[in-house]
Image: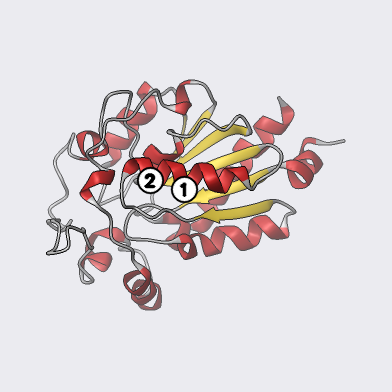
Amino acid sequence: MSSQSIDQQTMHIVLVHGAWADGSGWAKVIAPLVAEGFAVTAAPLPMTSYADDVKALEQALDRVAGPVLLAGHAYAGAVIAGVRNENVKALVYVSALVPDEGETVADVFYRTGLDPRAPQLAPDENGLIYYPHEAFAAAYAQNATNEELVVLAAVQRPISPACITAPIGRPLWKDRPSWFLIAEDDRMIAAANQRFMAERMQAMQRPFAVDHTPMVTAPETVLQVIREAAATVAAA
């Protein structure tokens, strides 16, 4: 049996959205993977606290049988590293934030200066952080079409400061092979910061000239990295 047939028959791809997003952001990745024979789940996060998000992802993984390739975008890079499910065989980071043990998401997000086109973010009167609608075109997804920008703004989900201020435990990437799609044109997480995180976690680095949301604006790049990771795990 070839590694490709093993991928299609047994590998379950679990995709995890970041802040100001939901699972619909993975639509252009989900459809091709399913067409290729992969089982795919887009796991939802409540984004009420880091612990809540890890618990929600663990619960989603409990519903999945067989080997799992876990992919996370942006903030979800921290979340996918917090699970302890033995079925997870590899991790894929997409323009992600990847704290080390004892660090917070905010620590790595603010490690380098922010792009001047990125918005200033602060909690609202309910203690939640929303992304300004006009900033989706300026910094979040500058390569998106107008229609895509409308959808991104409409479906955004807020994030609580409790998600980004909690120190994390031993990250799973220390015990699993990892791939890191580095978004060279990212205006939210500097490419240099992504490279720093990828290097210290010894991830396979895959740089592309894409914005912060390549699963929307350049899905083939994300698919390329996921396929490579799945094939490598299957061949191991």
- x then y, percent, for residue 182: 39, 41
Mark 2 highlights which residue? Answer: 52
Viewport quadrant of the C terminus: top right
Between 87 and 30, the one lying in front of the other is: 87
Q: Residue at x 39, y 78 (%)?
A: 147
Mark 1 highlights which residue? Answer: 56
Q: Is residue 114 left or right of residue 56?
A: left
Q: Is residue 127 above or below residue 55?
A: below
- Judged from the image, the secondary structure of the residue bearing numbered disc 1 is helix
Q: Does residue 223 show up? A: yes
Viewport quadrant of the N terminus: top right
- x then y, percent, for residue 46: 38, 55
Q: CA distance from mark 1 to mark 2?
A: 6 Å
Three-letter amino acid code at the position of disc 2: Asp
Q: Is residue 197 left or right of residue 172?
A: left
- x then y, percent, for residue 140: 29, 59
- x then y, percent, for residue 139: 24, 59
Between 128 and 18, the one lying in front of the other is: 128
Q: Is residue 46 above or below residue 205?
A: below
Q: Is residue 53 above or below residue 146?
A: above
Dot 2, how many residues are within 10 Å of its Cα: few (below 14), some (14-19), or many (20+)? some
Q: Residue at x 43, y 41 (%)?
A: 54
Q: Quadrant of residue 19?
A: bottom left
Three-letter amino acid code at the position of disc 1: Ala
Q: Which mark is residue 218?
A: none
Q: Residue at x 44, y 33 (%)?
A: 81
Whether pointer 1 and pointer 2 mark residues with C-beta atoms closer than 8 Å, the reply is yes
- Judged from the image, the secondary structure of the residue bearing numbered disc 2 is helix
Q: Is residue 188 left or right of residue 121?
A: right
Dot 1, how many residues are within 10 Å of its Cα: few (below 14), some (14-19), or many (20+)? some
Q: Is residue 214 above or below residue 84?
A: below
